[in-house]
Amino acid sequence: GGSGGAGVSSFDFEQYMSTNAKAVREALDRALPDRQPERLSEAMRYSALSGGKFVRPILAIAACELVGGSAAAATPVSCAVEMVHAMSLVHDDMPCMDDDALRRGRPATHVAFGEYTALLSGDALLALAFEHLARGCVELGVTVVPAERALRAVAELANAAGAGGVAAGQVADKASEGVPVSLAMLEYIHLHKTARLLEAAAVCGAIVGGGTDGEIESVRRYARSVGLLFQVVDDVLDVTRTSEQLGKTAGKDLAADKATYPKLLGVGQAQAYAAELLAMAEAELQGFDADRAAPLHHLARFIAYRQN
Ligand code: GRG
């Protein structure tokens, strides 16, 4: 329980991230198959356990605890959201999408396992996400996650993965390659392709944690702002990193025709927008207990101030 707002300063964010990342990794390891066909299981594990930061699962756990739920209640949904994230990266790297050979510093799934196995392992991860979410909540029991909350979480995550979110954002992104992109279109792409799944992670955490409708919607606005912030900061870092490394190869492949916030707004305005998004995210946390909100405050600042 919070007493007097000391939470923000005394909170150990690195410890919180590493403890939760370890717990998520163990839960994912248990949730992923290791049975026949071996190659499919291997590809699923390779994609989901290959060194992601687990930002989405940790967001789900933090939002669950924010509204007074236990971390245990958020375990099924935190694994489910990471499975959706992992499969979206597998499909994103495939030749028909962005055609990337590397992901997280090692061969992309389609390079390591071949195209059809990569495609099917993505499909299987997407299906498993919902199986695991439903089954995991049932196994925890209705005293931990009432069935209505589990159903609401299923609907939220499904919307975020499909035509209401990631799939819609990716179609818009692919369709806008090589054509001029307006600020409104750039915003649409990022809100759907990136922010929507971060939003669903946090919202699902707040749902299974027993948040009120008002709390759930505050969490939604918080995560939406953080999701956009993530993208704006990414775009700004692409520019600042590149200019710091004059003469060297930039860490990222900067497609000349790719629209970014700095290109459409200028670097200064893009930075100002990032500051505004951080302030909007933090404003949504004001109504909550300060100690319980500390992880989400730190997560927003971590995303805003990261240097690479
Ligand atoms: C979801 C049904 C469905 C289909 C997928 C391919 C595709 C459709 C969508 C592309 C989605 C995509 C690649 C979005 C970008 C997401 C993003 C910001 C990834 C980086 O996230 P981090 O930094 O990555 O959290 P790590 O590696 O830490 O997990």
Image: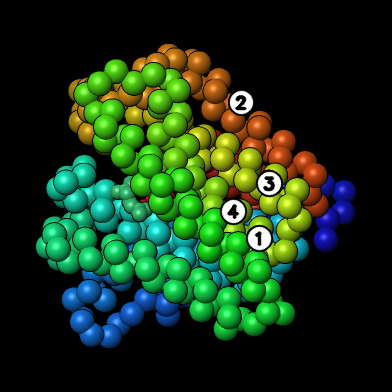
Q: Determine whether, in the image, residue 177 is placed left or right of residue 201.
A: left
Dot 2 falls on a residue whose secondary structure is: helix
Name the amino acid, label 1. Ile
The answer, for residue 216, to whether it is visible in the render is yes
The residues tagged by marks 4 and 3 sit, at their Cα atoms, a distance apart of 10 Å
Q: Identify residue type, mark 3.
A: Glu
**Residue drawn at 33 percent across, 34 percent down:** 172
Q: Nearer the viewer, mark 3 or mark 2?
A: 3
Evaluate if marks 3 and 2 touch, with contact meaning CB atoms under 8 Å apart.
no
Rate crowding at label 1 as few (under 14), some (14 to 19) or many (20 or more) other CA atoms within 10 Å: many
Label drawn at residue 207 = 1
Would you place residue 132 above or below residue 231 in this image?
A: below
Q: Which quadrant holds the N terminus?
A: bottom right
> Label 2 amino acid?
Glu
**Within 10 Å of the Cα at label 3, are there few (<14), some (14-19), or many (20+) other Cα atoms?**
some
Residue position marked by numbered label 3 in the rendering = 217
